[in-house]
Amino acid sequence: MKLLTGVMLIIIGAMIPSAIILPQRDLSLSVVPLQSTWQIHGLLLSSILFGPQIGLICAITYIFIGLFYLPIFHGGGSVGYILTPDFGFLLGFIPAAFTCGFLSKSRPRVCLLDITVYTVISLLILHIIGIIYLAIGKLTGLWSESLFDLILINSISPFPSQLLLCLAISHFSLYIKKLLIIK
């Protein structure tokens, strides 16, 4: 049940765009879309709630489903997705999920700051793996764009909104842990 819940958190997170709602001077609200979905943060949430093993299995299952069964990735799916610049970031899901789950379960009591640090560390790991994949793909001639452009488009540009969502998911995970009485 935990595995299914974790994978569904990632799949549903991939479908939900993120945005910030800002109040205006005339008391209306303005919606500012962010350059990210909740996909990564669904993975991190499942790792925080269910631990490193379930988080790791959720990441692997999500990648497997996207490669062989359903086009659930941000840019689609299928085995051909391996040749896209985005695939390296999906590979980063695996160590990021394990790291986030391991760190959040390593201490008996965690606070908002702890969980936020764990999600940020995991996000950094995911981006490092993605950038390594971009460099390998560029060296082997998979992509014609410059390495700087690839990193700018795939890592630097979405990183601030993903970082902001780390704070949101960390806060949200504390409430869910209390609600479900998860230790």
Image (cartoon, grey):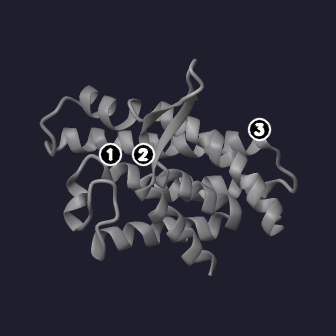
Residue type for callout 2: Ile
The quadrant in which residue 147 appears is: top left
Which sits in the foreground, 18 or 137?
Answer: 18
Q: Amino acid at mark 3?
A: Leu
Give the SS element for disc 1: helix
- Residue 52 in picture, x, y percent from top left: 64, 63
* Residue at image coords 25%, 28%: 149
Q: Is residue 51 left or right of residue 23?
A: right
Residue 90: x and y, percent?
A: 39, 55
Q: CA distance from mark 2 to mark 3?
A: 24 Å
Tell me the quadrant of the picture where the C terminus can be found.
bottom right
Give residue 15's quadrant in the image.
bottom left
Q: What is the residue that sits farthest to the top in this orientation? A: 25
Q: Residue furthest bottom?
A: 1
The disc placed on residue 129 is 2
Query: How many other residues sit within 10 Å of disc 3, few (<14), some (14-19) or many (≥20)?
Result: few
Task: Tell me the residue at 24%/59% (across/down).
Answer: 81
> Which residue does the numbered mark 1 point to in the structure image?
133
Looking at the rendered structure, the secondary structure element under dot 2 is helix
User: Which badge, 2 or 3, comes first in the chain's sequence?
Assistant: 3
**Depicted 83 relative to depicted 129: above or below:** below
What is the quadrant of residue 27 in the picture?
top right
Query: Disc 3 versus disc 1: distance between alpha carbons?
Result: 30 Å
Question: Which residue corresponds to mark 3?
Answer: 113
Q: Position of residue 118 (x, y in %)?
A: 67, 45
Q: Are marks 1 and 2 in contact (CB under 8 Å)?
A: yes
